Amino acid sequence: VDLQPVIEAASSPRFTAWSPYQPARRDLALVVSTDVAAEDLELTMRRTGKQLLRDVRLFDEYRGPPVDKDKRSLAFALTYGADDRTLTDADVDRVHERVVRTLSKRFGAELRT
């Protein structure tokens, strides 16, 4: 086993400066089929919102009434931000809505109310 690439990657310090601008956080609860992987949803969110979406974190999974037997509810915390400005609600809403539309089209995801 060649460990040299691992050693080089571990020894290369990487620093990203903190943004001086406050991030915006939104929670997103989705009802999806049980065969949809949370990782696929997360990857799609990251790709769709890449210009402003800084972090996605799954924080809850629920199965049971009123969610159908073949479905589950997954709740994610999304963090939006920009390095050059404070985001307005309109900035975040535009990207967040695009993320929700993409998940709906690709996975049949529905917002949990």
Image (tube, helix red, strand yellow):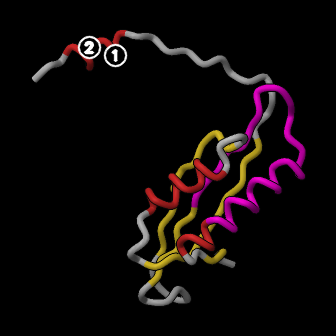
> Residue at horizontal 62%, vertical 73%?
105
The percent position of residue 54, horizontal first and vertical second, equals 64, 39
Q: Nearer the viewer, residue 9 or 61?
A: 9
Task: Say which residue appears at 73% left-offset and 60% top-offset.
Answer: 98
Q: Which mark is residue 40?
A: none
Q: Secondary structure at mark 2?
A: helix
Residue 54 located within the stretch drawn in magenta: no
The kind of residue on which mark 2 rests is: Ile
Q: Name the amino acid, label 1.
A: Ala
Residue at left offset 73%, top offset 24%: 19
> Is 104 situated above or below 44?
below
Q: Let me know if residue 83 is in the magenta part.
A: yes
Residue 40 or residue 61, whichever sits in front = 40
Seen in the picture, residue 19 relative to 86 is either above or below; the reply is above
State how many labels appear. Answer: 2
- In the rendered structure, find residue 10 and report the number of the disc placed on it: 1
Q: Which residues are magenta?
A: 76-102
Q: Are marks 1 and 2 in contact (CB under 8 Å)?
A: yes
Quadrant placement of the N terminus: top left
x then y, percent, for residue 23: 75, 38
Q: Which mark is residue 7?
A: 2
Q: Which of the 4 image quarters holds residue 50?
A: top right
SS type, badge 1: helix
